[in-house]
Image (cartoon, grey):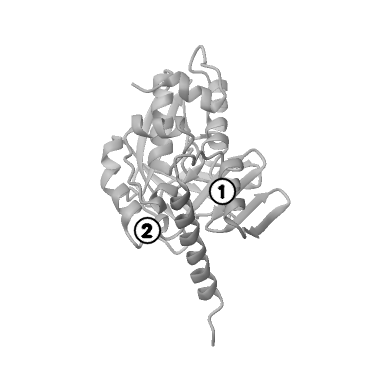
Amino acid sequence: MIDVDGYLAVLGVARPAAPTGEALWALHRAQVERVAYENIDIHLGRPTGIGAEESVARILRGRGGYCFHLNGAFGELLTALGYEVTRHRAGVQGTPEDPANADGDHLALTVRLDGERWLVDTGLGDGPHEPLPLREGSHTQGPFTYALAPSTAVPGGWRFTHDPRGSFTGMDFTPEPVDLSSFAEEHVRLSTSPESGFVRVLSAQRRDAEGVDVLRGRVLRRTGAGGTDERTIESADDWYDVLAGMFRLDLTDVDAPARAELWHRVRAAHRRWEAARHPVS
């Protein structure tokens, strides 16, 4: 069993009297606004599991995670509140060149409510701020326009297409329900393989109604209606203040030596990135 009241307290949402659409919208908005998409534990060398109870406990400690943690926890919360939730095997494509698939590097959620199904996905970083009706069409939320359509790569599945300014191209998911445990092997790969983007770059994202804040290494970017603003964080104190303030992340359990080492690694990765962008001829 999860601590439903504790989870709702983190989200700042009162326990709904019934599983209504209004409550679902409020819960989804609060989840993406208050619980960051982040991979810091990978860079701290702290392995995590993806069990729903463990992920909820992380959120209660002031932390976030990526899709297996965020949608795993959120799906468990919605189920506890009486919603009809289905977990789906999905695949995210980072660039237009990546083939569409549902190879299991993403956990997607749908909810059936009042005779209609909704894509309820809080694990995409700069993805939806509110649920999307699972039918063909486009939807504008803040600076982004998303599209949903039947998948051409996954029989019976669906395709979510991101705005061109988004951090990825799209996501396909299968129609069949799956258990959270079926993602365990992929979670190990994503959190340990040198080829994984989660391993290569420390990141945090937080969505709101007007846009998204994204931290990749030392680079902090805000995308909103007026475009994108970007700056490079110069000091460890500023960097940790951004994580605690903008991304609402509680890192009080990370001691001073671990903080210094993490900042050293982030700076080193930034230097390598800059060197790759501007090679010496």
In what quadrant of the picture does the C terminus appear? bottom right
Pick whichever, 207 or 178, lies toward us: 207
Q: In what element is the residue under mark 2?
A: loop
Mark 1 is on which residue type? Tyr
Residue at the extreme top: 17
Q: In what element is the residue under mark 1?
A: helix
- Mark 2: give few (<14), some (14-19) or many (20+) Cα within 10 Å: few
- Give the image quarter of residue 274: bottom right
Q: Which mark is residue 108?
A: none
What percent of the width, then of the height, locates residue 148? 50, 43
What percent of the width, then of the height, locates residue 30? 56, 30
* Residue matched to label 1: 240
Pick whichever, 257 or 78, lies toward us: 257
What residue appears at the point 57 percent right and 42 percent down from the top-left corner?
244
Pick whichever, 4 or 259, lies toward us: 259
What residue appears at the point 34 percent right and 62 percent down from the top-left corner?
194
- Give the image quarter of residue 182: top left
Mark 1 vs mark 2: give the one in front. 1
Distance between the Cα atoms at labels 1 and 2? 24 Å
In screen coordinates, is 134 left or right of 68?
right
Is residue 115 visible in the rendered image? The answer is no
Pick whichever, 93 or 272, lies toward us: 272
What percent of the width, then of the height, locates residue 42? 39, 51
Nearer-N-terminus badge (1/2): 2
Is residue 58 visible in the rendered image? The answer is yes
What percent of the width, then of the height, locates residue 191? 34, 52
What residue appears at the point 56 percent right and 77 percent down from the top-left corner?
278
What residue appears at the point 56 percent right and 38 percent down from the top-left corner?
248
**Count of marks, rendered view:** 2
Cβ atoms at labels 1 and 2 below 8 Å apart: no
Q: Which mark is residue 196?
A: 2
